[in-house]
Image (cartoon, helix red, strand yellow):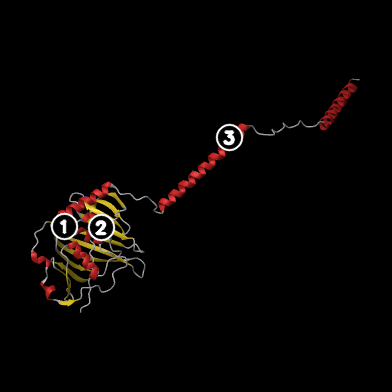
Amino acid sequence: MRICTNLGRAIAFIAGLAVAATVGAQTAPPAAAPAEANPPAKTVKQARKAKEAKEGKEAKEAKEAKEAKKTSAGEYKPVVEPRAMDLLKAVSAKLAAAKSMSFTANVGYEYPSKLGPPIVYTTRYDVTMQRPDKLRILMPGDGPASEFYYDGKEMIAYAPAGNLAAVADAPPTIEATLAAAFKTASIYFPFSDLLVADPLAALTNGVKLAFYVGPSAVVGGTKTDMMVWANDAVFVQIWIGADDKLPRRMRAVFAADPLGLRHDMELFNWQLEPEVSPDTFASAKAQAAGRMAFKAPGPPPRGAKPIIEGATPASPPAKAVLKSK
């Protein structure tokens, strides 16, 4: 009897399980929560703000990149700094006040080579002048030596190697004679603007850019101030003595030169107000030499003009290697 009872209980338990399984299979799963037909207005507004912020950031980054590209390409607004102009004024006042002076200039000119990199040729100029109408320039260098004399009445270009001299009547001032020498025979001196009566006018003619670079203690054996000056024709870096206000080095690149060749001039052996003998500005050898025409051996360099007419030559003219008559 007990066995039957236990058997009945087991059958009832199994049957219950079967019924539960059948009911579970026939029952539908619970429905998912219905999706909102439209998101809240707050969510849309936040998304719009996020999009606008992203677009604004991208626009700002694009603008900064464009400005950086312009800056790297050299597009900037030129400035004329008072400090730089004050240095030029100090140099000009020092030179203009000197009734006589002498100095040496070593000038290096770059010329293109067939290999690509430029070759440098160097000329030395030993200069003595006395205002307003005396000038002597002796020129040894990488090539035939030459000499230039001006005594207030005549100008002479002398070639010692050939013992030939070109003689011409000259104007009554140094600056007018320099202009005449260039116009007549393409004779040009890279320091002409330091010899004229008003160096400031020559040094600042058409200035578009001037700024102070910084100090230097390695040029000319003295402390100098570096500055940059430029107009439409030339870009010049100048080293000026911090104490004596004398130019010690000038480095120029001319706008008319498609190769951007550099012209470098070192100035030293400065003497202001030296005692100068009258016969300094004449040469017995030049007077006794054979004569040649006072004219250029060829046309002047393209775009070249003398300093005192408002521009610096785009490239150095040839020395006065003139044909004899």
Query: Residue at label 1?
Result: 270
Query: Residue at label 3?
Result: 46
Measured from the top left, where is residue 250 in percent x and y? 25, 57
* Residue 142 visible from this viewpoint: no
Measure how far apart labels 2 and 1 are at the Cα level. 15 Å
Q: Is residue 258 above or below residue 223?
A: below
| Closer to the camera in the image, 22 or 256 | 256
Name the amino acid, label 2. Met
Residue visible at 13% across and 73% down in the picture: 286
Quadrant for the C terminus in the image:
bottom left
Please report whichever mark, 1 or 3, sits nearer to the chain's N-terminal start.
3
Rendering quarter of residue 195: bottom left
Q: Is residue 210 above or below residue 40?
A: below
Instruction: Please identify the residue farthest to the bottom as the structure is shown.
Output: 325
Q: Is residue 217 above or below residue 9?
A: below
* Residue 56 visible from this viewpoint: yes
State the mark number for residue 250.
2
Measured from the top left, where is residue 89 in percent x and y? 22, 50
Please report whichever mark, 3 or 2, sits nearer to the chain's N-terminal start.
3
Measured from the top left, where is residue 52 in percent x and y? 55, 40
Residue visible at 21% across and 68% down in the picture: 181
Q: Is residue 287 above or below residue 102?
A: below
| Closer to the camera in the image, 307 or 254 | 307
Circles 1, 3 touching at the beta carbon (< 8 Å) = no
Measure how far apart labels 1 and 3 are at the Cα level. 75 Å
Q: Residues within 10 Å of mark 2 (few under 14, many from 20)?
A: many
